[in-house]
Image (tube, rainbow, N blue to C red):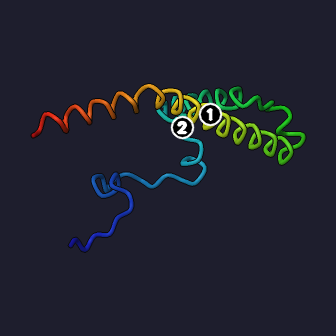
Amino acid sequence: MSDDISTSPKRANNPDETPRGFLARVFSIRLNEVLRLVLISVIVGLVLVAFQVDPAQLWVDFFGTLGEAVERIVEAVLGSADRAVQYFLMGAIIVLPIWLFMRLLGAFKRD
């Protein structure tokens, strides 16, 4: 283990560098941070549009709008689960008899 416990690798590599002040650290924004913020904002905007959430309404009635959004999400998930069960049953009507027939044929061939 090293005796030097340093939280900043830049200072460990360059001891002549003076530490920056609090405001300099807060307001120093890099391009990759800006791009990441833009990307996250677009993704969150798409999610809000998908669940029909009005951002202006969030400022007026945050918890009410959030509750409505959660309700829409639950309805979407349950609706998707309902459709998934319907598709499963419709597919099973065709797949299970074919599988059973193939299994029976395979059992006869093994002897």
- Figure quadrant of residue 74: top right
Q: Is residue 50 above or below residue 9?
A: above
Viewer-nearest of discs 1 and 2 = 1
> Is residue 1 or residue 88 the one in the foreground?
88
Residue drawn at x 84%, y 32% is 56
- Which residue occupies the foreground of this view, 74 or 68? 74
At label 2, the amino acid type is Ile
Identify the mark at residue 80; answer none if there is no mark.
1
Residue that appears at 35% across and 27% down:
98
Q: Specify the amino acid type for callout 1.
A: Ser
Question: Whole-Å distance between the Cαs marked 1 and 2?
Answer: 42 Å
- Classed neighbour count for the residue bearing mark 2: other residues with Cα under 10 Å, few (<14), some (14–19), many (≥20): few
Mark nearer the N terminus (1 vs 2): 2
Q: Is residue 7 above or below residue 60?
A: below
Q: Which mark, by number, is residue 100?
A: none
3 lies above or below 33? below
Q: Position of residue 85 (x, y in %)?
A: 57, 36
**Which percent across, then down, holds residue 5?**
32, 69
- The residue identified by callout 2 is 29
Q: Position of residue 78 (x, y in %)?
A: 67, 40
Residue at image location 19% in from the left, 39% down from the top: 107
Q: Residue at x 81, y 30 (%)?
A: 54
Q: Quadrant of the N terminus?
A: bottom left
Q: Secondary structure at mark 1?
A: helix
